[in-house]
Image (spheres, grey):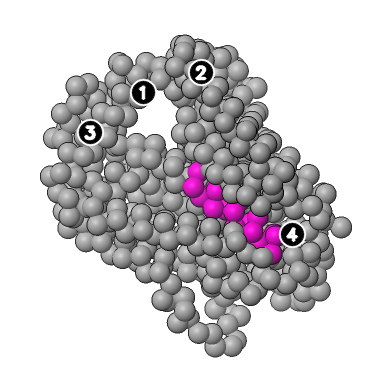
């Protein structure tokens, strides 16, 4: 059997299942009502109802195959890939320049439930000394503190939004703390992968539906008034123009977000699907999800998604090739041939090079590449002016015209923050904040590569897959806006890597290997 039933079906578990089921059903009814009375847009309400229904189906499935803790971890992973948020979109007092300052993510709901159950089940005393001394945790806490200090430079009208951003960072800290203390076996890793497979498949399927129907909301039943099919838009986009509003995006806000979410789990699906040979059915499921996601990433027309995913997969296969001599020559030869082909391809006029370098930008008539260079130059002006504490959290957009000395003067036509999370951190929070967050990411990558040397094959593949997905997303952050939204999705792989590193003995047993993800 693909999944093994456990004996953990006592009455408390059924009681919790019933409680959560009732809560999800009532939540769906409440959200639908909010949409009908106008407090929330109908589209947002229906998207929530659809995702909650899918989440409930996943929850019921996971309860059948495993214990409630694994089930909720799977739901947590699922929810971080849906990008469905509650936004009181019609209440202007909660807005600043169109950004909702009161947002509750679906992942927050499951995280609260997990913490509640964690407290109820903490019968024995546990020591958290090792966790408290964990370097990545310390680095992230320092980053949060320094970012909080930068609020002192924010003006009074911006501070409410800045404080919301701080709440977002604290939410990530709570998620990180929970994962590194509670992922304790491959049963939990398996549940996370199940949740990811369901979410990735759902997102990719929605994208394919959007391509065929032209409906650019999360599902066709939500409507859509585009006059032309997305297939025609995609053909035009890779030809001479860019129509970013019509590229597929699943249930996310934009195509780049969908590409990053899918790219986060594609490597682990591919690596386990190819190299873990003990369960053909699991390999088939993961490989199918990977193929579906790869097609969707291509249809997002996301340049950052293409480039970052390619680099992540290439590094992963090179590392694997070191342990498979017969495969090593093939992998290195394939990568070399691709690089030889890509050189002339990017240097000549063709749909792919036009998509990457075309003059389709609303900010710079010379093209997207020049647009990004102008944004980076302006961001450096912020950093040069206030390198230590930055200009203040949330102040980037407000001060854009002051620092914009670019040739295109894009701030007068379309004031947008720099599409680079790292420069954005440095500009608003100061260079020390950038150093702390980079040190945090580097420490996580070190942990990932170290765990990838584990003697257990499945542990090695899981660690390598999560690490390559993380590398792909970290590269994408160099071309990405909205850091808070971006960081939320990568936290599950980060927590899983740290848990494996902190508890290597829990992942050594061959019995766990056989019964966890492949039983």
Q: Main secondary structure of the magenta part?
A: helix
Instruction: Kindly report the distance in space between the C-alpha atoms of the residues bearing marks 3 and 1.
Output: 14 Å
Q: Which residue is mark 1?
A: 368
Does the magenta segment cover residue 469?
A: yes
Q: Residue at x 58, y 20 (%)?
A: 230
Question: Where, quadrant-wise, is the C terminus in this rendering?
Answer: bottom right
- Which comes sooner in the sequence, label 1 or label 4? 1
The residue that disc 4 covers is 517
Q: Quadrant of residue 233?
A: top right
Q: Give the residue number, with chain letter if any, for mark 3.
A: 377
Mark 1–mark 4 Cα distance, whole angstroms, equals 43 Å
Distance Cα–Cα, label 2 vs label 3: 28 Å
**Of callouts 3 and 4, which one flags the residue occurring earlier in the amino acid sequence?**
3
Sequence order check, earlier mark of 2 and 1: 2
Segment tinted magenta in the rendering: 456-472
Determine whether label 2 and label 1 are within 8 Å by CB. no
Q: Quadrant of residue 412?
A: top left
Residue 315 as seen in the image, left or right of residue 271: left
Q: Which badge, 2 or 4, is on the more N-terminal residue? A: 2
């Amino acid at each position: 059997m693909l999944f093994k039933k456990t004996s953990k079906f006592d009455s408390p578990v059924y009681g919790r299942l019933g409680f959560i089921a009732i809560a999800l059903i009532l939540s769906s009814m409440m959200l639908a009502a909010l949409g009908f009375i106008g407090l929330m847009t109908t589209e947002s309400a229906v998207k929530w109802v659809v995702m909650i229904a899918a989440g409930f189906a996943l929850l019921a499935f996971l309860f059948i195959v495993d214990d409630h803790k694994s089930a909720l971890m799977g739901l947590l992973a699922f929810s971080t890939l849906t990008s469905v948020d509650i936004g009181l979109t019609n209440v202007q007092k909660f807005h600043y320049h169109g950004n909702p300052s009161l947002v509750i993510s679906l992942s927050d709901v499951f995280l609260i439930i997990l913490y509640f159950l964690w407290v109820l089940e903490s019968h024995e005393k546990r020591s958290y000394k090792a966790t408290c001394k964990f370097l990545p945790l310390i680095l992230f806490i320092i980053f949060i503190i320094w970012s909080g200090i930068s609020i002192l430079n924010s003006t009074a009208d911006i501070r409410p939004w800045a404080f919301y951003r701080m709440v977002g960072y604290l939410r990530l800290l709570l998620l990180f703390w929970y994962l590194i203390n509670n992922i304790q076996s491959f049963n939990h890793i398996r549940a996370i992968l199940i949740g990811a497979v369901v979410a990735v498949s759902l997102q990719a399927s929605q994208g394919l539906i959007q391509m065929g129907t032209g409906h650019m909301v999360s599902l066709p039943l939500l409507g859509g008034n585009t006059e032309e099919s997305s297939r025609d838009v995609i053909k035009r986009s890779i030809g001479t123009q860019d129509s970013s509003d019509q590229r597929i995006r699943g249930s996310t806000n934009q195509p780049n977000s969908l590409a990053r979410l899918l790219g986060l789990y594609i490597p682990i699906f591919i690596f386990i699907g190819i190299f873990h040979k003990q369960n053909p059915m699991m390999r088939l499921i993961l490989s199918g999800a990977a193929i579906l996601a790869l097609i969707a990433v291509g249809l997002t027309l996301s340049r950052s998604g293409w480039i970052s995913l390619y680099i992540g997969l290439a590094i992963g296969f090179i590392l694997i090739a070191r342990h498979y001599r017969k495969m090593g020559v093939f992998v290195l030869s394939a990568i070399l041939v691709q690089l030889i082909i890509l050189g002339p391809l990017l240097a000549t006029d063709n749909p792919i090079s036009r998509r990457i370098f075309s003059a389709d930008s609303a900010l710079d008539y010379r093209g997207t590449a020049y647009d990004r260079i102008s944004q980076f130059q302006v961001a450096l002006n912020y950093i040069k002016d206030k390198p230590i504490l930055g200009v203040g959290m949330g102040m980037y957009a407000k001060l854009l015209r002051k620092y914009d000395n670019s040739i295109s003067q894009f701030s007068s036509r379309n004031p947008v923050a720099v599409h680079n999370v790292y420069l954005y951190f440095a500009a608003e929070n100061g260079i020390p904040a950038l150093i702390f967050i980079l040190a945090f990411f580097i420490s996580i990558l070190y942990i990932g590569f170290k765990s990838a040397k584990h003697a257990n094959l499945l542990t090695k593949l899981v660690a390598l897959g999560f690490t390559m997905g993380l590398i792909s997303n970290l590269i994408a952050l160099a071309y990405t806006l909205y850091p808070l939204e971006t960081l939320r999705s990568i936290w599950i792989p980060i927590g899983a890597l740290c848990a494996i590193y902190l508890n290597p003995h829990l992942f050594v047993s061959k019995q766990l290997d056989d019964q966890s993800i492949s039983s």
